[in-house]
Image (cartoon, grey):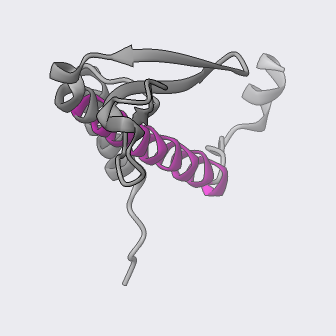
Amino acid sequence: MNTFPTLKELHRQKAQLLAQIKNFPDFRSGSLVGRYRKCGKPNCHCAKPDSKGHGPSWSLTRTVKGKTVTTIIPKDAVEITRKQISQYHQFQETVHNLVETNVKICDAQLASPAPETDDLSEVEKKG
């Protein structure tokens, strides 16, 4: 019993993954972090020892060409930003699956014998 997918099945899987990528919703990479800060005023509530401070203020950090880029995210956009980051992770997983499917296609093509010709003179003529 053959448990390996056929080349036709792999090409169908590749087409499905490409369709998913084409229809992906908006996404973004990065890490969303809520930060608290103390303002430094001695009479402010943040100066108390048990206070977290002011905040949270939200920032998104990501790497662009080897450098960290930070974007301030408004409080009312935190949930949509979380969703966009989640969609980015789903996109990454889909791309990973596409790469793995392509590797399987390439492996299957390597394993397939080259088409043989009955007439060697035809091969020599095209040579």
Position above or below: 33 against 126: below
Q: Which residue is rendered at x = 53% and y = 53% of the image?
A: 104
Which quadrant would the C terminus be assigned to in this image? top right
Residue 88 within the magenta-colored segment of the rendering? yes
| Residue found farthest to the bottom | 1
Task: Give 21 or 28, whichever is nearer the viewer.
Answer: 28
Q: Is residue 49 visible?
A: yes
Q: Quadrant of the N terminus?
A: bottom left
Q: Residue at x 66, y 41 (%)?
A: 117
- Magenta part of the protein: which range? 83-112
Residue drawn at (54%, 25%) of the image: 62
Magenta highlight on residue 111:
yes
Q: Quadrant of residue 25?
A: top left
The single residue placed furthest to the front in the displayed view is 43
Return the x and y of residue 66 as percentages of the image width and height.
73, 21
Position of residue 88 relative to residue 113, above or below, is: above
Q: Position of residue 82 (x, y in %)?
A: 26, 35
Name the spot of residue 6 as percent of width and height, x first. 39, 58
Total count of labels:
0
Can see residue 32?
A: no
Quarter of the image for residue 33 reads: top left
The foreground one among 3 and 91 is 91
